[in-house]
Amino acid sequence: MSEHIDSIAAAVTAAAFEVTDPDSSDHGRKLVHCFIGTIGADWDLDSVLDLLRSPGAKAQWSSHALARDHGLQVVAPDGRVRYFQVQRPEPDHPVAEDRPALGAPVPANDRGFLTYNGGPIPTAYGHDITVQESSAASGPHVWLFIRETPNTDCPDPHLNLEQAVQLRAALDQFIESVPARWDGGAELVAEAKQKVLGES
């Protein structure tokens, strides 16, 4: 999926480096490194911006292992795929006092199973993670539902520290709910903690 070209162009411009060595034949040029296949080269900033705006070109943020730190994938009108050394900017986050506190568990459906944190947890590249109580009858289980995002071709969520704390808190809500929702739940939690953490 193509991202908004203006936001990508701004990220490319911010990532470009200027050659400041006065003895270099490239002095004064603004460059962005590029990989195509296994071949690397520096591109003029203006050339990258022209490619982004070419009719038929497609750009997206990529987490492909072969891209290394070259996070911007551009498919040219001729079908050739290039990876540029540009990282997707972290989205802006509200200031701490404006952020919602951890949500209370809410029913996920009419069967009474709970969604912890009160709803999805957003992540850095746009995946949402929903922590939901499972209907498994064999013992306490929990689902982690991951919503896909058009922002990256990687299926794996990428969490900043705040989002990791929120996910852990949602899982803690699940663990702490077990004694009230299962016969012998307190013993099940104590047994699991002893087995995994060595807690008595």
Image: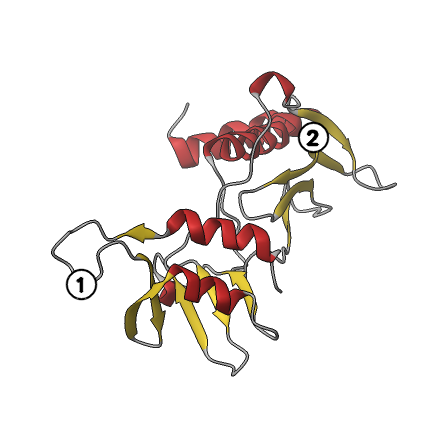
Q: Residue at x 58, y 53 (%)?
A: 6
Which of pointers 2 and 1 indicates the residue nearer the eye?
1
Residue farthest left in this picture: 23
Q: Quadrant of the C terminus?
A: top left
Using residue 61 as the reference point, say whether residue 27 is left or right of it.
left
Q: Which mark is residue 25?
A: 1
Give me the C-alpha separation between circle 2 and circle 1.
76 Å
Residue that badge 2 annotates: 183
Disc 1 on helix, strand or loop? Answer: loop
Residue farthest bottom in this picture: 78
Q: Residue at x 43, y 62 (%)?
A: 46
Q: Quadrant of the N terminus?
A: bottom right
Residue type highlighted by circle 1:
Ser
Residue 121 screen position, x and y as percent:
63, 38
Q: State whether residue 182 is above or below residue 20.
A: above
Q: Front-most of 22 and 89?
A: 22
Q: Please tell me which of labels 2 and 1 falls first in the chain.
A: 1
Q: Residue at x 11, y 56 (%)?
A: 23
Residue 171 screen position, x and y as percent:
58, 34
Residue 129 screen position, x and y as percent:
62, 44
Q: Residue at x 61, y 63 (%)?
A: 2
Q: Quadrant of residue 140?
A: top right
Q: State whether residue 38 is above or below residue 166.
A: below
Using residue 176 as the reference point, say whether residue 112 is left or right of it.
right
Residue type highlighted by circle 2:
Asp
Q: State whether residue 38 is above or below residue 119.
A: below
